Amino acid sequence: MHPVQATPERRKETAWVAPREGELKANVDAGWDPLTKKTGTAAIIRDHGGQVVVAAWNSVEGCLTPEEAEIHAGLLGLRLLISTSKGPATLESDCHRLVITCQEESVDRSTHWALYSEFKELLRVYNHISVCKVDRRNNRPAHALGQLGKAGSSGISWGSPPSYVSDLVDRDCMDIV
């Protein structure tokens, strides 16, 4: 089974933690509007130096819960990691339920079971990818991209993030941990 950090350590700093050299890390997040059920999902993949490999965001209609939105964001990040990483990689989400459910061996019986099943199957096949919980403070670029998606925008950017989030990425990388 792939490693999952179920109970995250609380970091006092608000710095993004870089993956090891040769590895990639995806940070994912979702923005959800309870009135319209419109969701923005986002993933940003960076290398050990904090350089953006790819950033993607999209709009998803009809998500019934914030949890469903976060699963969609996780799937976006997971698919991007699968297409860009052949070695060890990490997916970070600030959704505790998503991280915990990925660890469980049992069948998830929630209303989101089909999405969780897809997520878990991809992790089983691509077992070089681990999933970890991250504090919201360490997930700002993905959050900003998710807001773009929630506003109805979709896109993918290879090699650099949209200007809307580049300052956040730069701040993350000032003191790479």
Image: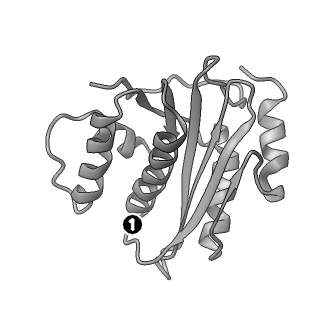
Q: Which residue is at 59% across, 30% downward?
A: 24
Q: State the image quarter where residue 67 is shown.
A: bottom left
- In the image, residue 93 sits, relative to residue 151, either above or below, namely above
Q: Tell me if 43 is positioned left or right of 145 in this view.
A: left
- In the image, residue 52 sits, relative to residue 150, either above or below, namely above
- In the image, residue 152 sits, relative to residue 155, either above or below, namely below
- The x and y percentages for residue 39 are 51, 69
- The x and y percentages for residue 101 are 29, 41
Display colour scheme: one colour
Which residue corresponds to mark 1?
65
Q: Nearer the viewer, residue 35 or 106?
A: 106
Q: State the image quarter where residue 176 is shown.
A: top right
Q: Nearer the viewer, residue 145 or 47?
A: 47
- The x and y percentages for residue 90 are 50, 31
Q: Which residue is at 23% across, 63% downward?
A: 111
- The x and y percentages for residue 92 are 52, 37
Is residue 175 shown to the viewer in this render? yes
- In the image, residue 115 sits, relative to residue 62, either above or below, namely above
Is residue 94 shown to the viewer in this render? no
